[in-house]
Amino acid sequence: MRLLIVEDDRETAAYLAKGLKESGHVVDHAKDGVDGLELARGQTYDVAIVDRMLPRMDGLTLVKTMRDEGNLVPVLFLSALSDIDDRVRGLKAGGDDYLTKPYAITELLARVDALVRRRQPEQVQTKLVVGDLELDLLSRSATRNKQTIELQPREFLLLEYLMRHAGQVVTRTMLLENVWDYHFDPQTNVIDVHISRLRAKIDKGFADALLHTVRGAGYCLRAVP
């Protein structure tokens, strides 16, 4: 990752930069708020680590200016000011996290990693695949070996749950709670009926069976190795 340190104390900045570089990061350093703003304008950073008390432009003003200009780089404030009001001012100015001095470099590294993870968009799963069986969650369609499988709404939910737990034994209770939203045993053969219909649709006519009954335990959807 490429990180920006804005810190006026030379020894503190050197110590921090050393720890970050040893962890594999690329580090730029600005000695005051004005230089920090110029670097932030000219480079793309994964995280900016900003001291509160800076010459020429303090850290709060620096971050607020960055936000006003549309720069959304995650900011970790470092400061000896540890009162709740000081922390609140830092967050309201646009900071994403606030770490008080003195600090452990291990904690700072963990906070930097957390800021980067928070910034990354969550990967939304749109397709489930087990062997040659595919389930498209957007179009609500299923295919096996490129052949379309027509599923009723409940069959689709059942297959989705089994595919999300592929290779695992899924009990009848798990299916009742997660597919039918029953939190009691309805004393019917509803699961047996739907499993039988689903097995006929995804396994009949194909060389290898995917949906297996685990006697005394439940069901398992798994591809042939």
Image (cartoon, rainbow, N blue to C red):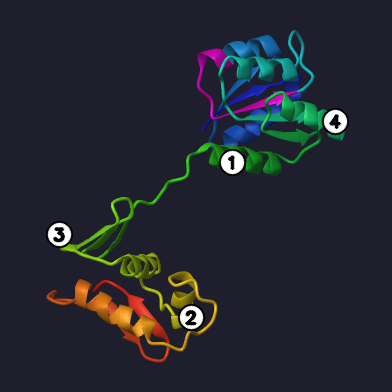
Cα–Cα span, label 1 and label 2:
39 Å
How packed is label 4: few (under 14 Cα within 10 Å), some, or many (20 or more)?
few
Given the image, on which type of amino acid does mark 2 rest? Answer: Thr
- Residue 36's image quarter? top right
Image coordinates for residue 188, horizontal then vertical, percent: 41, 87
The region drawn magenta spans 40-51
Image coordinates for residue 131, horizontal then vertical, percent: 24, 66
Checking the image for residue 173, the label placed there is: 2
Given the image, on which type of amino acid does mark 4 rest? Answer: Asp
Judge by depth and name the residue closer to the eye, 168 or 161: 161
Given the image, on which type of amino acid does mark 1 rest? Answer: Asp
Cα–Cα span, label 2 and label 3:
32 Å
How packed is label 2: few (under 14 Cα within 10 Å), some, or many (20 or more)?
some
Q: Which residue is mark 1?
A: 113
Whether residue 110 is situated above or below residue 69 in the rendered picture? below
Identify which residue is drawn at 37% across, 81% down.
Answer: 191
Determine if the magenta segment contains residue 126: no
Q: Which residue is mark 4?
A: 85
Number of the front mark, 1 or 4 = 4
